[in-house]
């Protein structure tokens, strides 16, 4: 099983700041099958980035993804108030599909 | 309008069984793998079961293998999750989901809460 580790668990920023979130895999992940989700309280997750770096439909261009092998990054170039949420990475190239434990982006 | 609607959640005693259903509308599930993803209170996401479009090569998380069974009925546009021998660790919101990102598909239900408690 591919274990995805997101650290730290919580990051604090002010609106307008740049946020960089990290996800490290226990083994190499095919970049085609690496995803970032955003989840707000009480709601289902929604995809932000798929295939490591492709923005999903309707996702603003302040969100970007990068990475390869075992190290992946989600960057939010300029945090808007609606971006404060929990972010999960996921791989679905190897069964069972796995998620990271999440990084909460909170307002400083 | 695309929808996935889960049902069947509730409160159940440890050791008992529960069956969740997911009804899709607005699209046909027959072409897509379907997934059950759960989230324990205050915790992260876990893929518990996935079933390919043709029902072959089903995969379960280690935590549920041997106790949970996923199935699908493409003619009824539904997916089910039979959960047996439930434990308190199975308490979670269970989401039905499917994704095909290159096609712009990322569909999730609203979730159904399963509480295992004596």
Image: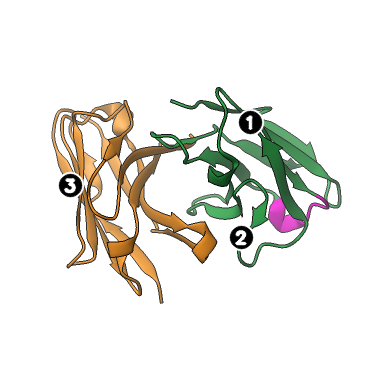
Chain colours: A green, B orange
Q: Position of residue B91 (x, y in %)?
A: 32, 35
Q: CA distance from mark 1 to mark 2?
A: 21 Å
State if disc 2 and disc 1 touch (CB < 8 Å). no
Q: Relative to residue A28, is residue B58 depicted above or below?
A: below
Task: Say which residue appears at 57% left-offset and 28% top-offset.
Answer: A28
Q: Chain of mark 3?
A: B
Question: Which residue position holds label 2?
Answer: A56
Q: Chain of mark 1?
A: A
Question: Which residue position holds label 1?
Answer: A69
Q: Relative to residue B5, is residue A103 depicted above or below?
A: above
Occupied quadrant, residue B21: bottom left
Asked if the stretch drawn in magenta spans residue A82, the answer is yes
Task: Say which residue appears at 51% left-offset and 51% top-offset.
Answer: A45
Question: Which residue position holds label 3?
Answer: B19
Occupied quadrant, residue B85: top left
**Which is more foreground, mark 3 or mark 1?**
1
Q: Residues within 10 Å of mark 1 (few under 14, many from 20)?
A: few
To the question of a shared chain for discs 3 and 1, the answer is no
Magenta stretch?
Answer: A77-83
């Amino acid at each position: 099983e591919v274990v995805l580790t997101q650290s730290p668990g919580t990051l604090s920023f002010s609106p307008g700041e740049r946020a960089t979130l990290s996800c490290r895999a226990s083994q190499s992940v095919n970049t085609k099958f690496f995803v970032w989700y955003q989840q707000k309280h009480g709601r289902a997750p929604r995809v932000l980035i798929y295939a490591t770096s492709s923005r999903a439909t309707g996702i603003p261009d302040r969100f970007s993804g990068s990475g390869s092998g075992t190290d992946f990054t989600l960057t939010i170039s300029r945090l808007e108030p609606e971006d404060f949420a929990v972010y999960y990475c996921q791989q679905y190239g190897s069964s069972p599909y796995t998620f990271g434990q999440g990084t909460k982006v909170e307002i400083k | 309008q695309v929808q996935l609607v889960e049902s069947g959640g509730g409160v159940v005693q440890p050791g008992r069984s529960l069956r969740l259903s997911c009804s899709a509308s607005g699209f046909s599930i027959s072409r897509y793998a379907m997934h059950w993803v759960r989230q324990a209170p205050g915790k992260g996401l876990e893929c518990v079961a996935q079933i390919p479009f043709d029902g072959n090569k089903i995969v379960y998380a280690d935590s549920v293998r041997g106790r949970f069974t996923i199935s699908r009925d493409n003619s009824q546009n539904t997916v089910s999750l039979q959960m047996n021998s439930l434990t308190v660790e199975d308490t979670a919101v269970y989401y039905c989901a499917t994704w095909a990102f290159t096609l712009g598909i990322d569909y999730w239900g609203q979730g159904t809460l399963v509480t295992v408690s004596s």
